[in-house]
């Protein structure tokens, strides 16, 4: 009986395929790690820590002024209606931050249309979960989390 060469048998190729497939998966993971954005990683922790003191001061000012707000977003028309308590400014800034992708972040200016009511407009339709920060030129800030998958309405908290 004439034995078949090793390269024509199943088991040597099966044994070779396991480490080769592991190397291929490793190369793919390394390429994803090197080429994907790292928006959630902060380069300078010290500067971020100093910035927290400013944010705390802005939020304390909002607490002292007893400022609160609620927002309604109409994705069909792009209209944003903000109802506030104790805000006296003519223009407020509403910052939209996406928690995962910083390229989606944007802000809009809200103009006063009546007592305790402001209006702004979105350039494009938005969806998903957003962190909102409402700021004034006076220096106060309040924040909220808007989940557009559940509702188009949220209440700001101090």
Image (cartoon, rainbow, N blue to C red):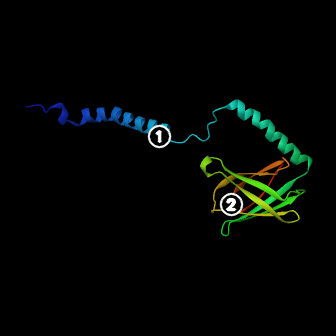
Question: Is residue 101 or residue 5 the one in the foreground?
Answer: 101
Q: Mark 1 points at which residue?
A: 32
Give how far across and how far down residue 65 sits, in percent: 91, 50
**Vertical placement of 121 versus 57: above or below?**
below
Q: Name the residue under label 2.
A: 150
Tell whether 59 sits left or right of 19.
right
Look at 84% across and 44% down and name the residue there: 59
Tell whether 30 sits left or right of 126.
left
The answer to whether residue 101 of the structure is visible from this angle is no
**Vertical placement of 42 versus 87: above or below?**
above
Give how far across and how far down residue 75 sits, in percent: 66, 66
Tell whether 59 sits left or right of 39.
right
User: Could you tell me how far apart the alpha carbons at marks 1 and 2 are, in whole angstroms?
Assistant: 32 Å
Local SS, label 1: helix
Give how far across and how far down residue 122 sits, in percent: 68, 62
Q: Which of the two discs, 1 and 2, labels the residue nearer the N terminus?
A: 1
The answer to whether residue 3 of the structure is visible from this angle is yes
Label 1 Cα neighbours within 10 Å, binned few <14 / some 14-19 / many ≥20: few
Q: Identify the disc placed on residue 90.
A: none
Label 2 Cα neighbours within 10 Å, binned few <14 / some 14-19 / many ≥20: few
Give how far across and how far down residue 84 sits, in percent: 85, 59
Question: Is residue 8 or residue 28 the one in the foreground?
Answer: 28
Look at 87% across and 43% down and name the residue there: 60
The mark closer to the camera, 1 or 2, is 1
Question: Is residue 12 or residue 143 the one in the foreground?
Answer: 143
Local SS, label 2: loop
**Vertical placement of 45 versus 104: above or below?**
above
């Amino acid at each position: 009986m004439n034995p078949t060469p090793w390269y024509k048998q199943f088991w040597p190729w099966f044994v070779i395929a396991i480490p080769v497939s592991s190397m291929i998966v490793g190369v793919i993971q390394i390429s994803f790690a090197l080429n994907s954005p790292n928006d959630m990683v902060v380069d300078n922790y010290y500067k971020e820590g100093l910035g927290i003191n400013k944010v705390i001061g802005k939020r304390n000012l909002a607490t002292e002024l007893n400022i609160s707000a609620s927002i309604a977003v109409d994705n069909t028309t792009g209209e944003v209606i903000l109802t506030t308590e104790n805000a006296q400014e003519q223009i407020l800034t509403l910052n939209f931050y996406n928690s995962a992708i910083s390229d989606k972040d944007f802000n809009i200016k809200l103009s006063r249309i009546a007592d305790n009511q402001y209006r702004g407009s979105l350039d494009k339709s938005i969806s998903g979960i957003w962190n909102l920060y409402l700021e004034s030129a006076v220096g106060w800030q309040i924040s909220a989390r808007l989940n557009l998958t559940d509702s188009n309405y949220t209440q700001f908290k101090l």
